[in-house]
Amino acid sequence: MTTPLPLSLPPLPASRPLNHCISFAHSQLAFSTPLSLSKSSQRRASLTPMLSDSRRSTSLASQQEPRELNNESDFESLFSPDGYISICGFGSLLSERSARSTFPDLVNFRVVRLNGFRRVFAHVAPIFFERGIAKPETKEISSLSVEPCAEETLIVTVFEIRKSEIPAFIERELEFRFLAVLPETLDEKPLDNLAVLCARYSDDEFFNIRCKGNKEIYFQHYGKWNVDKIWRDDVLPCRVYLRHCVLAAKNLGDVAYNNFLDHTYLADRKTTIRQYLSTTGSGIMEEDPPESLKYRYGG
């Protein structure tokens, strides 16, 4: 059984802007910033309560940096008066069926735009090992994450879940950095509420903060699968998962489908998924998932 870990994240250093493409080297940095929010972060947080008027949307849209969610109280600041919080989906959560398998009571599932991020298959996911669909011999073990990139725009989904579902959400996504972002409608109007986005984290942060520097805790999450590095630039997408994400995007329509193919990259950050599926990854879309996963990974 996995040992629960508290959510405790340091804020990003001021010298590491979020509105430019992250280089692989940046992601390997360790941080020693105190866990409490900086004064500037507190001021930004005080300016972004859960309101729904046009002044708030205009103010949020003008911000150039997403706000990092460092602790559970930061999540609480995003809840609506009726106890809901918005979640962004960019991979398997492009599928409403898949999203409902994780969040059965979600509401208001819809397609939106997210500016300033790109999708990258650079994250080793332990769930693929647990489900028997990882192929470590070919390095086809990667799931999706997103990372800041100023010139990119993604078509993603957003939906609302109950406040009570957040602790389990945090536990499932422990290896990610949690950001509060403001998506737009497809006609480029900012949404009323901020949404939680799971973005790229780093190995040092995961081990030192989430695992508290404890090798036994790390082993329970990753070590038992012989994974000693989570964020990598030498891995390929898990075949079953990639097929699922492509089908999910296709089910959302041509705009989402083409955006996924042309704005999602391998870990080299050069090869798009459209290029990959027409070359090295050809045949992936014709492969059926294992019988036990056909529903979950059916698009």
Image: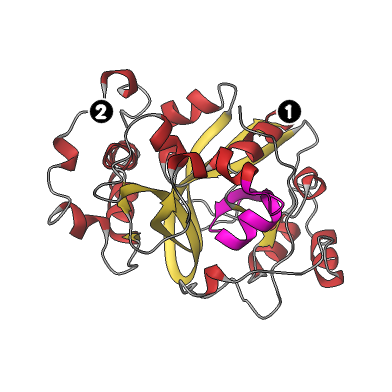
Q: CA distance from mark 1 to mark 2?
A: 32 Å
- The answer to which image quadrant residue 170 occupies is top right
- The answer to which image quadrant residue 59 occupies is bottom right
Which quadrant, please, contains the C terminus? top left
* Disc assigned to residue 164: 1
Q: Nearer the viewer, residue 99 or 22?
A: 22
Name the spot of residue 41 as percent of width and height, x first.
Answer: 80, 67
Question: What amino acid is labelled 1 in the image?
Answer: Ser
Tell me if residue 126 comes above or below residue 69 in the rendering: above
**SS at badge 2:** loop
Give the foreground label among 1 and 2. Answer: 2
**SS at badge 1:** helix
User: What residue is shown at x 48% (from left), y 31% (from top)?
Assistant: 99
Magenta stretch: give its range.
191-215
User: What residue is shown at x 48% (from left), y 24% (from top)?
Assistant: 101
* Disc assigned to residue 289: 2
Tell me if residue 160 comes above or below residue 52 in the rendering: above
Name the spot of residue 197 as percent of width and height, x first.
Answer: 58, 50
Name the spot of residue 220 as percent of width and height, x first.
Answer: 57, 38
Q: Is 201 in the magenta?
A: yes
Question: What amino acid is labelled 2 in the image?
Answer: Pro
Neighbour tally class for label 2: few under 14, some 14-19, many 20 plus, Cα within 10 Å: some
